[in-house]
Image (cartoon, rainbow, N blue to C red):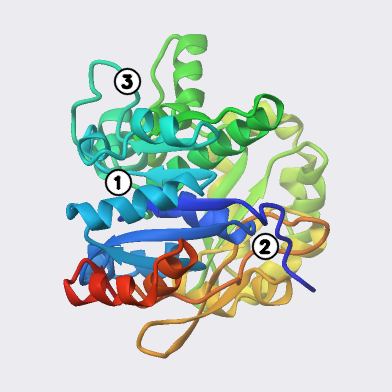
Amino acid sequence: MTSPTPLKGIRVLEFTHMVMGPTAGMTLADLGAEVIKVEPAPEGDSTRRLTGSGTGFYAAFQRSRRSLCIDIKAPEGLALVRRLAVKTDVLVENFRPGAMAKLGLGFAELSALNPGLVYCSCKGFLPGPYEHRTALDEVVQMMGGLAYMTGLEGRPLRAGSSVIDIMGGLSAVVGILAALSERQRTGQGGEIQAGLFETVALLMAQHMAQTKITGSAPPPMSVRRPAWPVYDIFATSDGGQVFVGVVTDTQWPAFCAAFGLEDLGADPSLATKQQRVGERDRTIPRIAAALAAYTKPELMAKCEALGLPFAPIGKPADLFEDPHLLGSGGLVPLTLPDGSPIDLPALPVSIDGARPGGTGDLRRPGEDGPEIAAELGYSAAEIAALRATGILAG
């Protein structure tokens, strides 16, 4: 089935690095936009060369771009980029505050040349007292409460993914799509900003509301007050682990009958969800012992037959072989710069039954630069001169 391309015909100029901005660019590219990634000459985005926990950043979020490696501090390089901006629908950047304006590529400068331009800045903080600060995913997780809610009491722990960067990038796309819709009515572009700190604040909204409603702040999830009678990780006989939830009054008797716990199912003191929550100290050890008699596959099959929420405790690498992802177009095939193949997750949406994405491999630094310059009207001699001086790489 052909991948849907609802943003076909939209050109995006991207000045980003790391995760937040690239997530926005990847999403727009997967939806069919032409995305041109502007990278510094001669080696390209430094994200390409990250090691350690950053090793996968570039491969994960940089597919489906065209790469333009150019020295925008040189007048000739800046002139090329400004010419390109005039022919662009959307610009995405995540440089430090004021950096693009200092280069002559800020919203005011470029919107004067291209009034229809939608200009999106991915920032640590939206305008306000903190906007001058440097922010990273981990910084805002710590200050916004996510690390507190994730770790043990007194031991804040960042979430196990760049969740704020990724969600912040998706928030940027929401703003971009809204601005493009507005442009259809007015013909005018606009300035969009997305903030990491504001993203983590939205994720904390449920805990903020709970604090206000109950009068007490929730503890970390690791020591939370359970909201459900059975909502736990259970060991299996083969050394595995399975999360199982029994969250409704109708599920409870069927669950008890299936696992030899009929006495609990018939106990009038456990008739309602609220009663069972209050009796967890008594019921969970019995339930754990009953479920420990099953292997991991057996327990999962039994829970699926009962229609219970359940999940194996997986690791990221397990997703390469996940039957659902493999069977639903949920993995996008790519070729890494070293020539090796890899399958990475598609966008988590389906459009008319098809998954978007898979429109292009990772590009070598500046691979598309000469072609882009030619499309802008540069002659072969002009392109050769730009390459000879190192202003245009690739």
Write the residue at 62% across / 36% down. 180
Mark 1 or 3, nearer chain start: 3
- The foreground one among 367 and 343 is 367
Q: Are marks 2 and 3 in contact (CB under 8 Å)?
A: no
The residue where tag 3 is placed is 127
User: Which of disc 3 and disc 2 is earlier in sequence?
Assistant: 3
Locate residue 349, reporting x and y percent: 68, 54
Image point (35%, 64%), residue name: 57
Q: Name the residue at 65% across, 71% down.
A: 325
Decide if residue 6 is on the left or right side of residue 372. Answer: right
Q: Position of residue 216 (x, y in %)?
A: 40, 14
- Going from the N terminus, do you reach mark 1 or mark 2 first? 1
Which of the labelled discs sits on residue 326, or is there none? Answer: none
For marks 2 and 3, give the CA distance: 33 Å
> Dot 2 corresponds to which residue?
356
- Circle 2 residues within 10 Å: few <14, some 14–19, many ≥20: many
Label 3 is placed on what type of residue? Pro
Q: How many marks?
A: 3
Q: How far from the left and from the top, in percent, is residue 256?
A: 75, 52
Mark 1–mark 3 distance (CA, rounded to whole Å): 25 Å
Q: Secondary structure at mark 2?
A: loop
Give the residue at mark 1. Answer: 158
Residue 360 screen position, x and y as percent: 55, 74
In the image, residue 305 sits, relative to residue 23, either above or below, namely below
Could you tell whether 135 is left or right of 110 in the image? left
Q: Secondary structure at mark 1?
A: loop
Q: Is residue 183 visible?
A: yes
- For discs 1 and 2, the disc positioned in front in the rendered view: 2
